[in-house]
Image: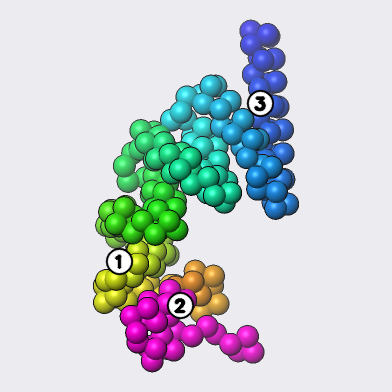
C-alpha cells in the first residue's frame, strides 16, 4: 500500500509539473513550445484514468486548442472529436461540458470556412441551450452569434442577421454594453450587415467610441 501510495504521489507531482510548464509556456506566448507538455499531460492522464475521465478530457481539449493555434488543424479536429465522444460518454449528451466541446469543434470548422460542416453542431447546441438554460443566459447569446457567423459564411444573410441581432439584444440586456461578449456580438452584427450589402444597418452596430 505504501509503494502504491508513493507511485500515485509521484504521478501527481509529475502531472502538476507538466501542467505548470505547459501553461507557463502558453501564457508566455510560446504556443508551439507548450505543445509537447500538453501532449505528455494528456497521454499520462489517459494512461492513468482512461480517455473518458474528466482530467483526461480537460487535457485533450487543451491540446486541441494548442494544435489549433499552431495551425495543425487536422490533428486539432481529430482531438476535438475525441473530446466530444469522451464528454458524451462521461457526462451525457446535453451536459454543459459536452456543449463546450461541441462549440470548440464547430469553431475550428468555422475558422476553416467549413460552414456546411459546422452548421449542424451550432444548430444542435443552440436547440439544447434554448431548451435547458434560462431565457437570458449568456451562452444562448454567444451561440446565436457564432451560428450567425456560420449562416453568413453560407450566404444566408437574412437568417444570419436574425440570429446576430437576437444575440446582441440578449447580451446587451444581460451583460451590458461594455462586456466583451456584447462587443463581439455587436461586431458580428456589423459584419453580417456589411457582407449582406446593407451598410446603413451595419453602421447601427459600429463599435462604441473610446471617449464614451
- Residue depicted at x 27% and y 71%: 156
- At 65% from the left edge and 35% from the top edge, which residue is drawn? 37
* Residue of label 2: 186
| In this rendering, the label closer to the viewer, 2 or 3 | 2
For label 3, the residue is 12
State left or right for residue 140 relative to residue 26.
Answer: left
Eyeballing the image, is 178 above or below 73? below
The span picked out in magenta is 187-212
Say which of 98 and 199 sits in front. Answer: 199
Residue 166 position within the rendered picture, expressed as x and y whole percent measured from the top left: 34, 74
Q: CA distance from mark 2 to mark 3?
A: 44 Å
Looking at the image, tell me whether mark 1 or mark 3 is earlier in sequence order: 3
* Figure check: 104 above or below 52: below
Q: Residue furthest bottom?
A: 200
Q: Quadrant of residue 12?
A: top right
Real-space CA distance between mark 1 and mark 3, rounded to the nearest whole angstrom:
47 Å
x 32%, y 76%: residue: 161
Residue on which the image places disc 1: 154
Is residue 121 found left or right of 77 in the rendered image? left
User: If the image is split into quadrants, where does the C terminus sit?
Assistant: bottom right
Residue 118 screen position, x and y as percent: 34, 55
Q: Is residue 95 above or below residue 154?
A: above
- Does the magenta run of residues contain 193? yes
- Mark 2 and mark 1 in contact? Answer it, CB < 8 Å: no
* Earlier sequence position, callout 2 versus callout 3: 3
> Which colouring convention does the figure follow?
rainbow
| For discs 1 and 3, the disc positioned in front in the rendered view | 1
Identify the secondary structure beneath mark 1.
loop
Q: Residues within 10 Å of mark 2 (few under 14, many from 20)?
A: many
Can residue 93 be found in the magenta stretch?
Answer: no
How many residues crowd mark 3 within 10 Å: few (<14), some (14–19), many (20+)? few
Q: Percent from the top left, x then y, of residue 136?
A: 37, 68
Amino acid at each position: 500500500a505504501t509503494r502504491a501510495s508513493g507511485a500515485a504521489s509521484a504521478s501527481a507531482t509529475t502531472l502538476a509539473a507538466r501542467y505548470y510548464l505547459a501553461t507557463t509556456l502558453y501564457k508566455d506566448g510560446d504556443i508551439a513550445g507548450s505543445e509537447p507538455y500538453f501532449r505528455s499531460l494528456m497521454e499520462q492522464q489517459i494512461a492513468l484514468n482512461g480517455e473518458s475521465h474528466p482530467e483526461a478530457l480537460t487535457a485533450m481539449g487543451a491540446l486541441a486548442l494548442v494544435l489549433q493555434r499552431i495551425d495543425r488543424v487536422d490533428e486539432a479536429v481529430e482531438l476535438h472529436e475525441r473530446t466530444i465522444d469522451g464528454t458524451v460518454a462521461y457526462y451525457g449528451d446535453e451536459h454543459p461540458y459536452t456543449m463546450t466541446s461541441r462549440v470548440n469543434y464547430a469553431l475550428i470548422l468555422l475558422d476553416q470556412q467549413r460552414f456546411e460542416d459546422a452548421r449542424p453542431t451550432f444548430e444542435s447546441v443552440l436547440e439544447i441551450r434554448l431548451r435547458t438554460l434560462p431565457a437570458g443566459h449568456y451562452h444562448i447569446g454567444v451561440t446565436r452569434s457564432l451560428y450567425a457567423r456560420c449562416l453568413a459564411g453560407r450566404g444566408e444573410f437574412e437568417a444570419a442577421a436574425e440570429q446576430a441581432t437576437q444575440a446582441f439584444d440578449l447580451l446587451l440586456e444581460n451583460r451590458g454594453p461594455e462586456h466583451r461578449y456584447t462587443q463581439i456580438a455587436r461586431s458580428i452584427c456589423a459584419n453580417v450587415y456589411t457582407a449582406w450589402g446593407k451598410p446603413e444597418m451595419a453602421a447601427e452596430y459600429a463599435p462604441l467610441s473610446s471617449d464614451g
